[in-house]
Amino acid sequence: MVNVYEAKTSLSKLLTEVEAGEEIVISRNGRPIARLTPIQQRTEPRVLGDLAGQILVAPDFDEFTEQDERDWCGA
């Protein structure tokens, strides 16, 4: 755990530690207020179309009706 002042003055060093897998807790007046953690990188590529056939889009979903105009614009 490091205090805010120390975190501000040694941010670069703290980020190096986080890159190495460490978790840093930042405190103010002895009370934890934030956590620096490494971002988990995706190890597998995303699969496009993974939800194909599971989502239904109504044929008229992008039609803007007169009622929509009244609802959105108050006209």
Image (cartoon, rainbow, N blue to C red):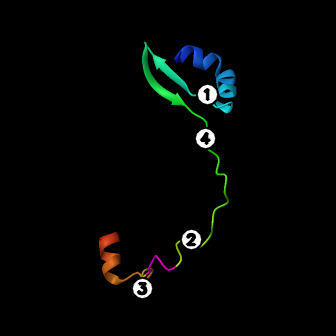
Q: Which mark is on residue 39?
A: 4
Q: Are marks 1 and 4 in contact (CB under 8 Å)?
A: no
Q: Are marks 2 and 3 in contact (CB under 8 Å)?
A: no
Q: Are marks 3 and 4 in contact (CB under 8 Å)?
A: no
Q: Which residue is mark 1?
A: 22
At numbered mark 1, what does the secondary structure look like: helix, strand or loop?
loop
Q: In the drawing, does residue 39 fall left or right of residue 27?
A: right
Q: Which residue is mark 2?
A: 50
The quarter of the image holding the C terminus is: bottom left
Q: Residues within 10 Å of mark 1 (few under 14, many from 20)?
A: some
Residue type pointed to by label 2: Asp
- The magenta span reads 53-57
Q: CA distance from mark 2 to mark 1?
A: 33 Å
Which callout, 2 or 3, points to the residue nearer the camera? 2
Residue 70 picture location, percent across and down: 30, 76
Point out the tag, 1 or 4, that comes first from the N-terminus. 1
Q: Which residue is mark 3?
A: 60
Point out the tag, 2 or 3, that comes first from the N-terminus. 2
Tell me where residue 58 sits by quadrant: bottom left
Q: Which of the two residues, 31 or 66, is positioned nearer the viewer here?
A: 31
